[in-house]
Image (tube, rainbow, N blue to C red):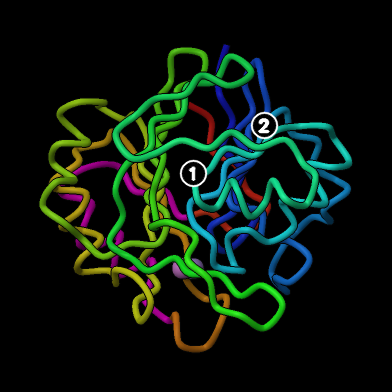
Amino acid sequence: MSVKITWLGHAAFLIEGSRKVLIDPFISGNPSSPVKPSDVRPDVIAVTHGHGDHVGDAIEIARENGCPIVCIHELSRILGSEGVEVVGMNIGGTAVVRDVAFTMTPALHSADVEVDGQIISAGCAAGFVVGIDGVKIYHAGDTGVFYDMKLIGELYSPDVALLPVGDWYTMGPREAAKAVELIKPRVAIPMHYGTFPVINGSPEEFKELASKHCEVVILKPGESYEV
Ligand code: NI
Ligand code: MN
């Protein structure tokens, strides 16, 4: 059985195998999103950090589908207070939720959230290695490049790496190509670019730089890649 990875724009991906996993569902606020929140029917949602362009429609989708949200402990307390099922975990650990393995990885990024006009701590930013049907997919979240990405590659050998390339808030193409060199996935898919004017890192430049290390697949929002 193959696993289908569909880019929903920005950092949002739907991973479909024996279960459906939705990551960072920023959908209704994203003009480039090819779907509506009610179109996706996940078994489990994962959120990398508390910023609005990653939490997105997670609460509404979790409520409609009765599915849990996997995220870092502090963020799980905040989202859980909305009455949805949450699975709080932390960096370095693996949680198996609805038969899908979520290993939480570090990310070099901030992660506070605004709740009722107040900025509050939501733990730190993270990424995930998602293990489903024998396939491992690394979603880096929002991050700068860091040398311990090599450790993520050595420990988990991800088949596919989903990497931000948009620059400004995250890695740009040059840094993301270095990340590929450290992680050594079979396939890399760029994300977190083009949504807003400032995140203008070029996926083509990333492809040119990273192609000597692995296959690079550039998706348009709504397009899929099958592993
Ligand atoms: Ni962020
Ligand atoms: Mn972001």
Crowd around label 2: few <14 · some 14–19 · many ≥20 (10 Å) = many
Q: Amino acid at mark 2?
A: Val
* Residue 75 position within the rendered picture, expressed as x and y whole percent measured from the top left: 55, 52
Distance between the Cα atoms at labels 2 and 1?
A: 16 Å
Q: Which residue lies at the image location 22% right of the left edge and 36% below the top edge? A: 152
Q: Amino acid at mark 1?
A: His
Q: Does 78 appear in magenta? A: no
Residue 21 is drawn in which quadrant? top right
Q: Which mark is residue 104?
A: none
Determine whether, in the image, residue 223 is placed left or right of residue 212.
right
* Residue 110 position within the rendered picture, expressed as x and y whole percent measured from the top left: 38, 69
What range of the chain is rendered magenta? 200-218
Determine whether, in the image, residue 37 is placed left or right of residue 107.
right
SS for dot 1: helix
Q: How many marks?
A: 2
- Depth check: give the residue in front, 50 or 193: 50
* Residue 46 position within the rendered picture, expressed as x and y whole percent measured from the top left: 57, 41
Q: Which mark is residue 73?
A: 1
Residue 57 is drawn in which quadrant? bottom right
Which residue of the protein is positioned furthest toward the bottom in this rendering? 197
User: Of label 2 and label 1, which has the lower sequence position?
Assistant: 2
* Residue 52 position within the rendered picture, expressed as x and y whole percent measured from the top left: 61, 69
Q: Is residue 187 above or below residue 7?
A: above
Q: Quadrant of the N terminus?
A: top right
Name the residue carrying label 2.
Answer: 44
- Depth check: give the residue in front, 61 or 50: 50
Q: Which residue lies at the image location 43% right of the left edge and 56% below the top edge? A: 123
- Depth check: give the residue in front, 127 or 181: 127
Q: Which residue lies at the image location 39% right of the left edge and 47% below the top edge? A: 127
Q: Is residue 141 above or below residue 200?
A: above
Disc 1 residue lies near ligand 1 with CB under 8 A: no
Q: Does 211 appear in magenta? A: yes
